[in-house]
Image (cartoon, rainbow, N blue to C red):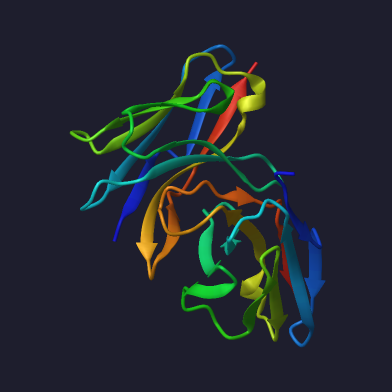
Amino acid sequence: AQSVTQLGSHVSVSEGALVLLRCNYSSSVPPYLFWYVQYPNQGLQLLLKYTSAATLVKGINGFEAEFKKSETSFHLTKPSAHMSDAAEYFCAVSEAIQGAQKLVFGQGTRLTINP
Amino acid sequence: DTEVTQTPKHLVMGMTNKKSLKCEQHMGHRAMYWYKQKAKKPPELMFVYSYEKLSINESVPSRFSPECPNSSLLNLHLHALQPEDSALYLCASSQDTGTQREKLFFGSGTQLSVL
């Protein structure tokens, strides 16, 4: 079974600072990887996804992630944090089960932005 | 319209009650999902419907009964729930479900409390 591990359940950065959220995956086949964001009292929204087309993936709201096979990582970054980035971030890997797609999420990282 | 609409937003029910959660999308998506999210935890897949047929049941107890009356509508019927079933129930949809690359669109969820 495929899985993802998010290092750090809580990350705190200052406004304007670099955001780095870590995700490592475990997969015996080339993985399909996703980053989703969840704002308080809301559902999840896709930030970006890796589907093997390019190792550097750009997403919405200035976020990007780099797929590194040698490190089995898919870390999420943003050059300059904004107060509105405060949310819960989930890394996920997609599995095929019985012809359907199953997303397996990491434990999540809560991002706090300090003014 | 890129929304997944879930009703009700909040639900409180007793262990002997019968209630239903409703999910609707008008994006022409052919795959729909139910996820369960406990507080401070990642979402966990419960069911996947593909082309109105149940594709995945993640060994969910029979007190949860999904229904997909048509391609736009997904219900989750609840009966004889336990307090530990209290959680945020998220509905999602995607264009398809067979490629593992699909972007899921999530609703805001129904916050369920079982007394």
Which of these two is toward me, B88 or B75?
B75
Which of these two is toward me, B8 or A115?
B8
What residue sits 72% from the left and 63% below the top?
B23
What residue sits 37% from the left and 66% below the top?
A97
Name the outermost residue toward the top.
A16
What residue sits 71% from the left and 51% below the top?
B108
Rendering quarter of residue B70: bottom right
Vertical comparison of B69 with A35: above or below: below
Question: Split into 4 quadrants, where in the image is the N terminus of chain A?
Answer: bottom left
Residue B3, percent across and down? 72, 47
Question: Split into 4 quadrants, where in the image is the C terminus of chain A?
Answer: top right
What residue sits 51% from the left and 56% below the top?
B96
Rendering quarter of residue A38: top right
Residue A75, percent across and down? 37, 31
Please indicate whether residue A90 sits to the left or right of residue A96 in the image.
right
Residue B19, percent across and down? 78, 78
